[in-house]
Amino acid sequence: MGWIEVLARTYDNCLSEVGRIDVRTKKYGNKEFSETIVLLPESHLTVNAFAEIRLNIDGEYITSRKVDKNEQLTIVPVTEDSASRSSGITPMPLCDKLSYIAGDYDEYVKEEKNKRPCYEAYMKELHKWSDLPDTPRKVKAICSYLDKGCVMKDLTENGVCDGTDGFVRFIVSDSDSNDRENRTWRDAAIYDSFIKYYRTCMENTDIDYSTGKVCAVTQKLPAKLRNTGDKAKLISSNDTTNFTFKGRFRTASEAAMIGYETSQKAHNALRWLIAYQGYRNDSEYIICWSPGNEPVPSPMKSTDEYLENYEEDDDDDIIADTEKIFAEKLNNAMNGYLHGFSDMDKDRVDRGDLKVVVMAVDTADGSNQGRLSITYYNEQHPVEFIRNVFRWHKECSWEHYRKESDGKNYYYGAPSPKEIILTAYGTEMSGGIDIGNKKMMKKNIDRLLPCIVQGRKIPKDIVRAVVINLGNPLRFGSYNRNRLLENACAVIRKYQIDYGKEVFSVALNKESNDRDYLFGRLLAAAHNLEDYINYKSNNTGRETNAMKYWSVYVQKPAKTYSLIRQRLQPYISKLTSGSRNYYLELAEEIFDKLSENDSFNNEPLGENYLMGYYSQSAEFRKNRTKETTEGEN
């Protein structure tokens, strides 16, 4: 099944959502904004209306008002031509600009160009629909009122008209009807009436390339898919100047011919999915959905975002318990998603509803012009998809500090794809982490998508970039440094699983003889000892010698550790006898393991030193917490 047919099927399964306007608060970067989301009926678009006219069912004027900015979104019927009008006289069927609906426009707005032909063309088209016997009375009332040619007079006298040639919408009150919906732009009966009427107006029939059926077809396909200013189209064959299809086809109809109804459903569904749940990756949008309208997990979220509403226990302080609880929560969430697909009847399976689709769209240059390309497309059985997503979250998991918490300072799971790329290529900017090159961010998130959705191995060069970026921690502040370290450990753990290497967890592995892991433990011991003394002396802003020599230590660990050890002597002398013995015994234990295999040398360190550093630091942190609550041992 092709992407057009899948989207059209999705539309058919979401008919209950058609016309329902939903306002949501979204966040992109550090900015929050409100976005209005609506699944449009066939042959309809949205416009922003500046004025609203109230009529009675006989077409008599009652009142009018200016529309508040947050209420302006209006669903209006459109024809093929009016949906993409840019110049010329192309009226919309019901709601339109003043220059089209006002017969007295030229009397109140002095312009060189005569607008009377716009009004005449508009009324001619409106009468074709209004004069049909089964057209809703509200449409007939609007037509009757506009025939009088007094819109500008009524708006001006009521203080509504300010010279703006904007869209006007209508409310029609019918006291004799049980219909409570008097807003014509929200009336399903008016939607259905126009759709039925407009289908009878379409005469061009041919084979629909997406379904293989003979039906009314179109070559004027919708734009405004990613946002209201988006002019890029997924399918277009109207370029007869540069001959886009030259050498393959003789005419545009041979290049692309899509059924009008199929096109409307597919594009409206795509526009709705992007607005409703699309992940914005710069100019690219990534959507994940089931054609049967069952909820599916987004591959672009972190584990914490998945489980943020899951009820937590109070006794998950210990790391081992945290991992166990994390696994239970993840399994419960996975089973919750799978349950939606277990009750599907055979008919829905045969129709193609039993699948999960991941799709990404973008233009070649990231602009709002030209051709919109499908940069990624994948259809999967939902069980396979959900298992791949949760396998990613299990294998790319690590302990993370939650900056804003309600008492649970740490959570366990996978970082989002964006966090991984920030860890690999990001630099500190204004207290946060960012990448100056947005194309690099977009490209590498696209590379991670198949790893999450299809279970492919994580790219080695991204792992290498993560390790290199963490090789100079002084470029980052304390919080960002720890944040990137946590993400790096998650990525390295996934790399270890994917490529069959020794796998480390957050819990300290005291038995491991891995050289890189042991050198990471030594570095953590040196850092935490000095950091502890600084904390006791109220010098928390001072960088430790371990941090200062980190980048050199990674290249020549044995030589650099000897230098760090010498500089630690004043700090060791300030420890209590018990703490001093604990540190010296720990350092000697690690040193002995390195010496057993002649591993205490200056060969550069691999990625496992970051795992050893984090796990040893976590052990110190746990002991320090116990010291705070139970007193120093």
Image (cartoon, rainbow, N blue to C red):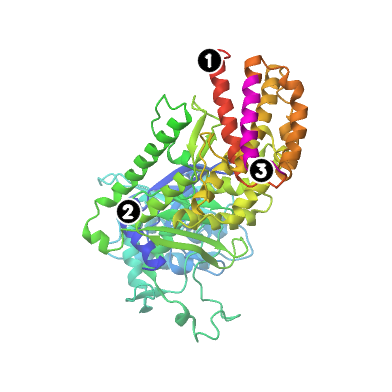
- Residue at x-position 33% and y-position 56%: 190
Instruction: Tell me which amino acid carries mark 1.
Output: Thr
Q: Earlier in the sequence, mark 1 or mark 2?
A: 2
Q: Which residues are magenta?
A: 581-601
Residue 396 in the image, given as x and y percentages of width and height: 50, 46
Looking at this view, is 110 or 480 the one in front? Answer: 480
Judge left or right: residue 341 versus residue 73: left
Looking at this view, is 633 or 130 the one in front? Answer: 633
Disc 3: which residue: 598
Q: Earlier in the sequence, mark 3 or mark 1?
A: 3
- The crowding category of the residue bearing disc 1, from other C-alpha atoms within 10 Å (few below 14, some 14 to 19, many at least 20), is few
Instruction: Tell me which amino acid carries mark 3.
Output: Asp
Tell me, for residue 188, which label it has, or none: 2
- The answer to whether the residue labelled 1 contacts the one labelled 2, judged by CB atoms less than 8 Å apart, is no
Judge left or right: residue 303 versus residue 484: left
Looking at this view, is 584 or 567 the one in front? Answer: 584
Residue 594 in the image, given as x and y percentages of width and height: 64, 39
Disc 1: which residue: 629
Taking the magenta stretch, the answer to whether it contains residue 593 is yes
Q: CA distance from mark 3 to mark 1?
A: 41 Å
Tell me, for residue 109, which label it has, or none: none
> Is residue 237 shown above or below 231?
below
Residue 488 in the image, given as x and y percentages of width and height: 59, 43
Judge left or right: residue 447 versus residue 320: right
The quadrant of the image that shows the C terminus is top right
- The crowding category of the residue bearing disc 3, from other C-alpha atoms within 10 Å (few below 14, some 14 to 19, many at least 20), is few
Q: CA distance from mark 2 to mark 3?
A: 79 Å
- Residue at x-position 64% and y-position 32%: 524
Regarding residue 30, the answer to whether it shows in the image is: no
Residue 246, located in which quarter of the rendered image?
bottom right
